[in-house]
Amino acid sequence: MKGITVTERTLSIIKPDATKRNLTGQINAILEEGGLRIVAQKRIQLTLAQAMEFYSVHRERPFFGELCEFMTSGPVLVQVLEGEKAISRNREIMGATNPADADAGTIRNRFALSLTENSVHGSDAGDTAAVEIGFFFAGIELVG
Ligand code: CDP
Ligand code: MG
C-alpha cells in the first residue's frame, strides 16, 4: 500500500573467502550504502556440525559436502540487516548465486571467487530469515 513501509530483518553471512581477503569493511560499506542497517554482527568460526545444521535444507544436494567444508575453512561474519524490504533488498545487493550470472556492481559480481566461494549469504524469505537469525543471535543481541 502507498506510504506504508515494510521494515524487515534478514540474516547475512560474510563467508570465509571474503574474511580471508579482508573484505568485511568493503562489503559492509556496500550493504550500508544500499540502505541496510547492521543491527547485530559477530565474527565466528563455524564447526562442521553447525555448518551442516545451518545448510540442512541442502543436505541432499551434490554440493552439500563442499559447501560445509568451505563454510568451516575460516571465520565468518554473521550479521542481522534491517531495512525497507531488507530480505529482497539484500538479495539484490548480493547478486545471483553464481557470480558468472551476478549483475555488475553486486557483491558477488565484485568479489566472489566461484559458485561455492561466493562471498555472502542472505536469507531468501521471511520464514527462513526468522529461523536463520535465531540460529545465530539471541533477541537481546539485536540492538537496532
Ligand atoms: O546462497 P544462495 O541462496 O544464493 O544459494 P543457494 O542455492 O541457497 O545455495 C547455498 C550456497 O551453496 C551458495 O551460496 C553456494 O555457496 C553453494 N552452492 C554451490 O556450491 N553449488 C551450487 N550448485 C549451488 C550452491
Ligand atoms: Mg539460499
Image: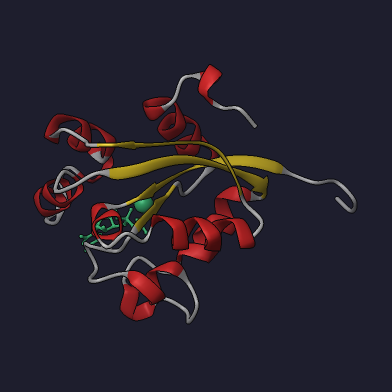
- Residue 74 percent across, percent down from the top left: 18, 47
Q: Residue at x 17, y 42 (%)?
A: 59
Answer above or below: position of 73 versus 143: below
Which one is in front, 74 or 3? 74
Q: Residue at x 27, y 41 (%)?
A: 57
The quadrant of the picture occupied by the C terminus is: top right
Where, by quadrant of the figure, is residue 52 drawn?
Answer: top left
In the visual, does 19 lie left or right of 61?
right
Which one is in front, 89 or 81? 81
- Residue 142 percent across, percent down from the top left: 56, 27
Where, by quadrant of the figure, is residue 110 drawn?
Answer: bottom left
Answer above or below: position of 105 versus 42: below
Q: Residue at x 51, y 45 (%)?
A: 125
* Extreme residue in the right direction: 3
Where, by quadrant of the figure, is residue 44 drawn?
Answer: top left
Answer above or below: position of 7 versus 33: above
In the visual, does 18 lie left or right of 26?
left
- Residue 20 percent across, percent down from the top left: 23, 57
- Residue 89 percent across, percent down from the top left: 59, 58
Q: Residue at x 54, y 63 (%)?
A: 30
Q: Colour scheme in the image?
A: secondary structure
**Number of callouts:** 0
Which one is in front, 33 or 10? 33
